[in-house]
Image (spheres, rainbow, N blue to C red):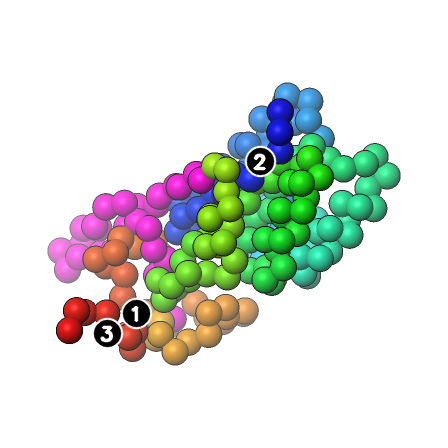
Amino acid sequence: MSAKLAVICGSMFAGKTEELIRRVTRAEIAGMSTLVFKPIIDDRYEKNKVTAHNGKDLRAIAVRESLEILVRLVGQKEGLPEVIAIDEAQFFDDEITDIILSVIEAGVSVIVAGLPLDFRGEPFGQMPRLLAEADEIVPVKAICTYHHEDGTICGRDATRTQRIIDGQPADYSDPIVLVGASEAYEARCRKHHIVPGAPDRELP
Protein backbone atom coordinates (compact mmCIF):
# COMPACT_ATOMS: atom_id res chain seq x y z
CA MET A 1 0.00 0.00 0.00
CA SER A 2 1.44 3.37 -1.01
CA ALA A 3 1.91 6.10 1.59
CA LYS A 4 -0.71 8.83 1.74
CA LEU A 5 -1.70 12.00 3.57
CA ALA A 6 -4.97 12.13 5.51
CA VAL A 7 -6.01 15.51 6.92
CA ILE A 8 -8.61 15.71 9.69
CA CYS A 9 -10.08 19.21 9.95
CA GLY A 10 -12.79 21.00 11.88
CA SER A 11 -13.48 23.53 14.61
CA MET A 12 -12.56 23.03 18.24
CA PHE A 13 -14.64 20.34 20.00
CA ALA A 14 -15.34 18.60 16.68
CA GLY A 15 -13.40 15.45 17.56
CA LYS A 16 -10.24 15.94 15.48
CA THR A 17 -7.86 14.46 18.04
CA GLU A 18 -10.31 11.67 18.81
CA GLU A 19 -10.33 10.72 15.11
CA LEU A 20 -6.53 10.92 14.95
CA ILE A 21 -6.26 8.61 17.97
CA ARG A 22 -8.78 6.20 16.40
CA ARG A 23 -6.79 6.00 13.17
CA VAL A 24 -3.45 5.52 14.93
CA THR A 25 -4.98 2.82 17.13
CA ARG A 26 -6.35 1.01 14.05
CA ALA A 27 -2.91 1.13 12.43
CA GLU A 28 -1.34 -0.36 15.55
CA ILE A 29 -3.96 -3.12 15.72
CA ALA A 30 -3.04 -3.91 12.11
CA GLY A 31 0.57 -4.38 13.23
CA MET A 32 1.92 -1.14 11.80
CA SER A 33 4.61 0.90 13.54
CA THR A 34 3.56 4.43 14.48
CA LEU A 35 4.86 7.69 15.96
CA VAL A 36 2.75 10.63 17.12
CA PHE A 37 3.91 14.27 17.26
CA LYS A 38 2.45 17.44 18.72
CA PRO A 39 3.60 21.06 18.99
CA ILE A 40 5.15 21.87 22.35
CA ILE A 41 2.91 24.96 22.56
CA ASP A 42 -0.08 22.66 23.13
CA ASP A 43 0.25 22.24 26.89
CA ARG A 44 -3.43 21.83 27.78
CA TYR A 45 -2.92 18.25 28.98
CA GLU A 46 0.15 16.09 29.54
CA LYS A 47 3.27 17.19 27.70
CA ASN A 48 4.00 13.79 26.16
CA LYS A 49 0.48 12.85 25.15
CA VAL A 50 -2.16 13.92 22.67
CA THR A 51 -5.45 13.98 24.53
CA ALA A 52 -8.96 14.26 23.13
CA HIS A 53 -11.74 16.10 24.94
CA ASN A 54 -13.34 12.72 25.69
CA GLY A 55 -10.26 11.75 27.72
CA LYS A 56 -8.69 9.29 25.26
CA ASP A 57 -4.98 9.77 24.73
CA LEU A 58 -1.84 8.48 23.05
CA ARG A 59 1.85 8.83 23.77
CA ALA A 60 3.33 11.65 21.70
CA ILE A 61 6.58 13.50 21.11
CA ALA A 62 6.31 17.25 21.73
CA VAL A 63 8.45 19.30 19.32
CA ARG A 64 9.21 23.00 18.95
CA GLU A 65 9.46 23.13 15.16
CA SER A 66 8.66 20.96 12.17
CA LEU A 67 12.29 20.17 11.35
CA GLU A 68 12.51 18.33 14.67
CA ILE A 69 9.97 15.82 13.35
CA LEU A 70 12.31 14.97 10.50
CA VAL A 71 15.31 14.72 12.82
CA ARG A 72 13.41 12.38 15.14
CA LEU A 73 12.34 10.16 12.26
CA VAL A 74 15.82 9.90 10.75
CA GLY A 75 17.22 9.07 14.19
CA GLN A 76 14.93 6.09 14.77
CA LYS A 77 17.10 3.01 15.43
CA GLU A 78 14.31 0.75 14.21
CA GLY A 79 14.04 2.64 10.93
CA LEU A 80 11.16 4.77 9.72
CA PRO A 81 7.71 4.02 11.13
CA GLU A 82 4.93 3.05 8.74
CA VAL A 83 2.59 5.77 10.00
CA ILE A 84 3.12 9.09 11.74
CA ALA A 85 0.42 11.36 13.15
CA ILE A 86 0.68 15.09 13.82
CA ASP A 87 -1.85 16.84 16.04
CA GLU A 88 -2.60 20.60 16.06
CA ALA A 89 -0.78 21.06 12.74
CA GLN A 90 -1.92 24.69 12.45
CA PHE A 91 0.62 25.68 15.11
CA PHE A 92 3.65 24.50 13.13
CA ASP A 93 5.92 26.68 11.00
CA ASP A 94 5.73 26.99 7.21
CA GLU A 95 8.12 24.07 6.61
CA ILE A 96 5.66 21.50 7.99
CA THR A 97 4.03 20.76 4.63
CA ASP A 98 7.29 20.18 2.75
CA ILE A 99 8.54 17.94 5.56
CA ILE A 100 5.32 15.92 5.51
CA LEU A 101 5.54 15.51 1.73
CA SER A 102 9.16 14.35 1.98
CA VAL A 103 8.16 11.81 4.64
CA ILE A 104 5.41 10.49 2.37
CA GLU A 105 7.90 10.22 -0.49
CA ALA A 106 9.98 8.04 1.82
CA GLY A 107 7.04 5.64 2.18
CA VAL A 108 5.53 6.82 5.47
CA SER A 109 1.79 7.55 5.67
CA VAL A 110 0.87 10.71 7.56
CA ILE A 111 -2.26 11.56 9.55
CA VAL A 112 -2.68 15.25 10.34
CA ALA A 113 -5.28 16.95 12.53
CA GLY A 114 -5.76 20.69 12.74
CA LEU A 115 -7.96 23.78 12.71
CA PRO A 116 -8.52 24.98 9.14
CA LEU A 117 -9.66 28.41 10.40
CA ASP A 118 -8.39 30.60 13.23
CA PHE A 119 -10.70 32.40 15.66
CA ARG A 120 -11.17 35.16 13.05
CA GLY A 121 -12.56 32.66 10.57
CA GLU A 122 -9.48 32.97 8.35
CA PRO A 123 -7.12 30.23 7.03
CA PHE A 124 -4.86 29.00 9.83
CA GLY A 125 -1.15 28.39 9.23
CA GLN A 126 -0.28 25.66 6.75
CA MET A 127 -3.67 23.94 6.98
CA PRO A 128 -4.91 25.26 3.60
CA ARG A 129 -1.86 23.83 1.81
CA LEU A 130 -2.09 20.55 3.70
CA LEU A 131 -5.73 20.24 2.67
CA ALA A 132 -4.76 20.94 -0.94
CA GLU A 133 -2.09 18.21 -0.81
CA ALA A 134 -4.25 15.64 1.03
CA ASP A 135 -5.08 12.27 -0.46
CA GLU A 136 -7.96 12.07 2.01
CA ILE A 137 -9.79 14.93 3.72
CA VAL A 138 -11.74 14.03 6.86
CA PRO A 139 -14.08 16.89 7.87
CA VAL A 140 -15.50 16.69 11.38
CA LYS A 141 -18.09 19.04 12.87
CA ALA A 142 -18.99 20.18 16.34
CA ILE A 143 -22.33 21.52 17.58
CA CYS A 144 -22.86 25.28 17.73
CA THR A 145 -23.26 26.19 21.40
CA TYR A 146 -24.42 29.79 20.90
CA HIS A 147 -27.01 30.57 23.59
CA HIS A 148 -30.20 32.36 22.55
CA GLU A 149 -31.87 34.80 24.91
CA ASP A 150 -34.36 32.12 25.95
CA GLY A 151 -31.50 29.90 27.13
CA THR A 152 -31.64 27.41 24.27
CA ILE A 153 -28.57 26.69 22.18
CA CYS A 154 -28.32 26.93 18.41
CA GLY A 155 -27.50 23.25 17.83
CA ARG A 156 -26.50 23.61 14.16
CA ASP A 157 -23.32 22.11 12.74
CA ALA A 158 -20.37 24.21 13.90
CA THR A 159 -17.51 24.88 11.50
CA ARG A 160 -15.90 27.79 13.33
CA THR A 161 -14.14 28.44 16.62
CA GLN A 162 -15.33 31.34 18.77
CA ARG A 163 -12.76 32.83 21.13
CA ILE A 164 -14.19 34.36 24.30
CA ILE A 165 -12.13 36.69 26.52
CA ASP A 166 -13.62 37.91 29.80
CA GLY A 167 -17.05 36.87 28.61
CA GLN A 168 -16.91 38.75 25.30
CA PRO A 169 -16.01 37.73 21.73
CA ALA A 170 -12.33 38.36 21.01
CA ASP A 171 -11.60 41.31 18.74
CA TYR A 172 -10.22 40.79 15.23
CA SER A 173 -7.04 42.65 16.27
CA ASP A 174 -6.21 40.16 19.05
CA PRO A 175 -3.23 37.83 18.44
CA ILE A 176 -3.95 34.61 16.58
CA VAL A 177 -2.29 32.56 19.34
CA LEU A 178 -2.63 33.62 22.98
CA VAL A 179 -0.56 31.54 25.36
CA GLY A 180 -1.65 31.70 28.98
CA ALA A 181 -4.41 34.21 28.33
CA SER A 182 -7.69 34.25 30.21
CA GLU A 183 -9.68 32.90 27.30
CA ALA A 184 -12.17 30.23 26.37
CA TYR A 185 -13.43 28.75 23.14
CA GLU A 186 -16.79 27.64 21.83
CA ALA A 187 -17.84 25.89 18.65
CA ARG A 188 -20.05 28.09 16.47
CA CYS A 189 -21.89 27.96 13.16
CA ARG A 190 -21.24 30.63 10.55
CA LYS A 191 -24.29 32.67 11.62
CA HIS A 192 -23.26 32.88 15.28
CA HIS A 193 -19.51 33.32 14.80
CA ILE A 194 -18.86 36.85 16.07
CA VAL A 195 -15.60 38.77 15.47
CA PRO A 196 -15.80 42.47 16.36
CA GLY A 197 -13.61 44.62 14.13
CA ALA A 198 -13.46 42.10 11.27
CA PRO A 199 -13.21 43.58 7.75
CA ASP A 200 -16.49 44.21 5.97
CA ARG A 201 -17.13 41.32 3.56
CA GLU A 202 -20.43 42.56 2.15
CA LEU A 203 -20.77 43.01 -1.60
CA PRO A 204 -20.43 46.64 -2.76
Residue 153 colored in magenta in the image = yes
On residue 195, the disc is 1
Residue type beneath disc 2: Lys
Residue count near mark 2 (Cα–Cα under 10 Å), binned few <14, some 14–19, many ≥20: many
The reply to whether the C-beta atoms of the residues labelled 1 and 3 are less than 8 Å apart is: no
User: Which stretch appears magenta?
Assistant: 137-165
Label located before the other in sequence (1 or 2): 2
Label located before the other in sequence (2 or 3): 2
What residue is drawn where x is 43% and y is 38%?
Answer: 138
Residue 108: image location, x then y, percent: 67, 36
Front residue of 8/164: it is: 8
- Identify residue for label 2: 4
Query: In this rendering, which labeled residue sits more in front, label 1 or label 3?
Result: 3
Residue type beneath disc 1: Val
Q: In which quadrant will I find the N terminus?
A: top right
Residue 14: image location, x then y, percent: 40, 45
In the visual, does 157 lie left or right of 137? left
- Locate residue 41: give its quadrant: bottom right
- Identify residue for label 3: 200
Front residue of 30/40: it is: 30
Front residue of 13/101: it is: 101
